[in-house]
Amino acid sequence: MKQLDEQVQQINELFLNGHVKESYELAKVLLVDNKFTEHEAYLTIQQHVSLLEANGYANMPVPSAEKVKQSVERTDGSYPERDVLAAYIGSEDEEQFGKVVDELLAGSVEAQANAYYTMAEYFALAKEQDKALVQYAEAIKLQPNKALYWGAFAQFLSRNEGSPYLALRLIEEAIHLDSMNPRWYYIQGNIFLQLVAATKNLSYLPALEEAWEKAKKRCSNKQVSLKVDIAKSNDVLSQWKKQLL
């Protein structure tokens, strides 16, 4: 029984610290253990797994062992993969935009994934959230080793009050694939803040603060905008904690 208690605690701690994939997998293993069916936490763990599977955890694309060159964020926060959309925003030439997207869709797997990412970002700007969700998911399916697509999807959910449980799983994969990108840790912290606000569970606070600290440490001197965002977020959190604690 003590071992089962420890496993339940581990499932909880893993999730609270952003290791949500491992938390989910350990919970699934525990549920098929006959000794666990009589445990007082059985229903809670069952509900935990059900919640995560309702957020797509059972059907996530799996990155391969192949090493992929990850996208580097520019000082203005942009990525090369977004240049097609940036050109359209500048010109508002819908015909040219459609033509370039079609060319990408007819290209390599990498080009196709870039096309779906581009359309996702386009629909996100157009506030067509359901369409954006589909396009982000397609980009990840085509190129699951590309951190940008996982991270952008997580950021979209975080900005649009989407499921924080799905967003946590997505950003965890982005961090796993590209652990030196400060953007992913900043987004992870934002998701934890969303969870604290939604659940009133202050146990997420240490992981939130750690995520933003990691983001801060990984910022280059030129990433001024991101540094300012992190500082502002920390100020908001400090004020919020004073009111809450």
Image (spheres, helix red, strand yellow):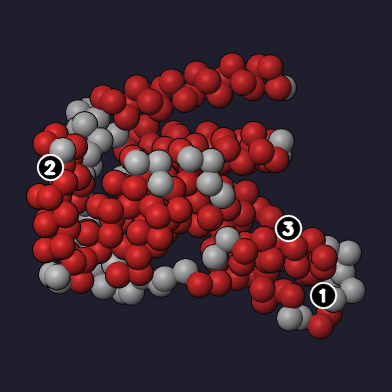
Task: Give the quadrant of residue 214.
Answer: top left
Kind of element beneath mark 2? loop
Task: Determine which residue is flagged by label 3.
Answer: 9
Residue 66 as seen in the image, left or right of residue 245: left
Task: Give the quadrant of residue 46.
Answer: bottom right
Q: Is residue 104 above or below residue 38?
A: above
Sort mark 1 into few (<14), some (14-19) or many (20+) by Cα contacts within 10 Å: some
The residue closer to the viewer here, 219 or 90, is 90
- The disc, 1 or 3, on the residue closer to the chain's N-terminal end is 3
- The disc, 3 or 2, on the residue closer to the chain's N-terminal end is 3
Name the residue: 29% across, 46% down: 122
Dot 3 and dot 2 residues touching (CB under 8 Å)? no
> Which x, y percent locates residue 103?
11, 63
Name the residue: 45% across, 34% down: 212
The residue closer to the viewer here, 214 or 151, is 151
Q: CA distance from mark 1 to mark 3?
A: 14 Å
> Which x, y percent locates residue 39?
87, 69
Task: Determine which residue is flagged by label 1.
Answer: 36
Looking at the rendered structure, the kind of residue marked 3 is: Gln
Query: Disc 1 vs disc 3: which is toward the camera?
Result: 1
Q: CA distance from mark 1 to mark 2?
A: 60 Å
- The disc, 1 or 2, on the residue closer to the chain's N-terminal end is 1
> Which x, y percent locates residue 111?
17, 64
